[in-house]
Amino acid sequence: LEVIESVEPRIAAATRAELTDQRASLKLIASENYASPAVLLTMGSWFSDKYAEGTVGHRFYAGCQNVDTVEALAAEHARELFGAEYAYAQPHSGIDANLVAFWSILAHRVEAPELAEHGVKNVNDLSEDHWEVLRKKFGEQRMLGMSLDAGGHLTHGFRPNISGKMFHQRSYGTDPETQLLDYDEVARVAREFKPLVLIAGYSAYPRRVNFAKMAEIAAEVGATFMVDMAHFAGLVAGKVFTGDEDPVPHADLVTTTTHKSLRGPRGGLVLSKEAYAADVDRGCPMVLGGPLAHVMAAKAVALAEARTAEFRAYAQRVADNAQTLAEGLQRRGVKLVTGGTDNHLVLLDVSGFGLTGRQGESALLDAGIVTNRNAVPNDPNGAWYTSGVRIGTPALTTRGFGAAEFDTVAELIVNVLKQTTPTTTASGAPGKAKYTLAPGVAEATKAAAAEL
Ligand code: PLP
């Protein structure tokens, strides 16, 4: 930091402040973690200075022999860790990984048959008329994914997102009573809609998914089955999710981030069956900018860490701690979406405290508990104010928290929410953003957290 300080002291100060904040607060954002020093140090290397568009052994720049080593190792670790036929380590983030997957599905399922029909290898060799036909076919394709308010991700066909514009989209939700995924309903919508792509995976669904069942549905309607395991990749790597709950054997393509429960650098990965490999491999430069070799090196280090027995024990603790946290919250009267959890995250419905998710998130932050607000199914407060607060256990489990600490965390959360009052608007109705936290609660909560 002294070196940075001599160039731009404000960046050095912000970096120090970030370290202090991350150490002092209770980091409960379900998608965050603490990467190891080995991962962090690997990211700050000379690889950042190298251009390497293309793929291993096939680059558009000279001098990429060391980038090749790094990218090949990251892919090898990913293949072996997840038992995948093919792995692609370049995506810069989870959204980029999804874009690469979408592009490779379109290339494999729509473009390749069209080229074969006209006896050419490249779209540039198509006549103008045939190219127009192909463009029209791209525009006709359909995607079915989990709805945003049931816990899906915005790249799974949410209309405002590019995925909702690339594809005709429809979504499946959860059962209105149980809030659980209803496979019969997914099958019904799939039969009616006949998507090219069926996506499973979530950002805010606190339950396991039976990927074997989802794969059967996809096969029945002729869809490519894609799973976005960005959130729970650490639980797959750590063998907490096995058999029908492991997406890799069942899906044609699996995408993930590397920085959430997997505890690596910020980035993404695509795993695929061999049939999609050649198209996935063209992700850069067809979809992605030049690879971040320093981050791919850090992915290789993180994936090597994830292959250890220590990481497996960590992943199991992440799931165990989520159970403890959920039980601790329910025992103290909190309503949880789906009535509990069996993965790494818990979704609180804070409407019982008379609060919006936004008020809950802000009051908790004042008390040093970092979470994020999240819509609950059919949320009356919409996606901005919401009625939910999402919390996850990966980061604090990395800090060594176990059952006793997580029960205290549940107590601190409930205490803060109970002592938060929404501020009324001019008309006397409760507001959606403003609130008052009773005096002394923030300080007392921070002091208790510091003891953990
Ligand atoms: N997919 C899912 C299911 C996610 O939860 C997220 C992140 O929130 C992403 C993709 C996007 O990841 P990134 O922010 O790395 O692009």
Image (cartoon, helix red, strand yellow):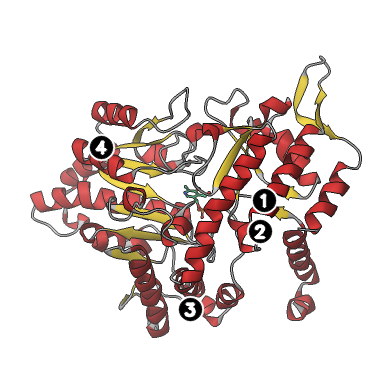
Look at mark 3 in the image and give the residue it sits on.
50
- SS for tag 4? helix
How far is disc 4 from disc 3 in space, using C-alphas? 44 Å
Snapshot quadrant of residue 172: top left
For marks 4 and 3, the one nearer the N-term is 3
**Front of the two marks 2 and 3:** 2
CB within 8 Å, label 1 to label 3: no
Image quarter in which the N terminus is found: bottom right
For marks 1 and 4, the one nearer the N-term is 4
For marks 2 and 3, the one nearer the N-term is 3
CB within 8 Å, label 2 to label 4: no
**Front of the two marks 1 and 4:** 1
Q: Nearer the viewer, residue 347 or 415?
A: 415
Look at mark 1 in the image and give the residue it sits on.
406
- The amino acid sitting under disc 4 is Ile
Look at mark 2 in the image and give the residue it sits on.
401
CB within 8 Å, label 1 to label 2: yes
CB within 8 Å, label 4 to label 3: no
Q: Nearer the viewer, residue 272 or 309?
A: 309
- The amino acid sitting under disc 3 is Lys
* Disc sitting over residue 217 in the figure: 4
- The amino acid sitting under disc 2 is Phe
Could you say where residue 435 lies in the image, as x and y percent from the top left? 81, 31
**Front of the two marks 4 and 3:** 4
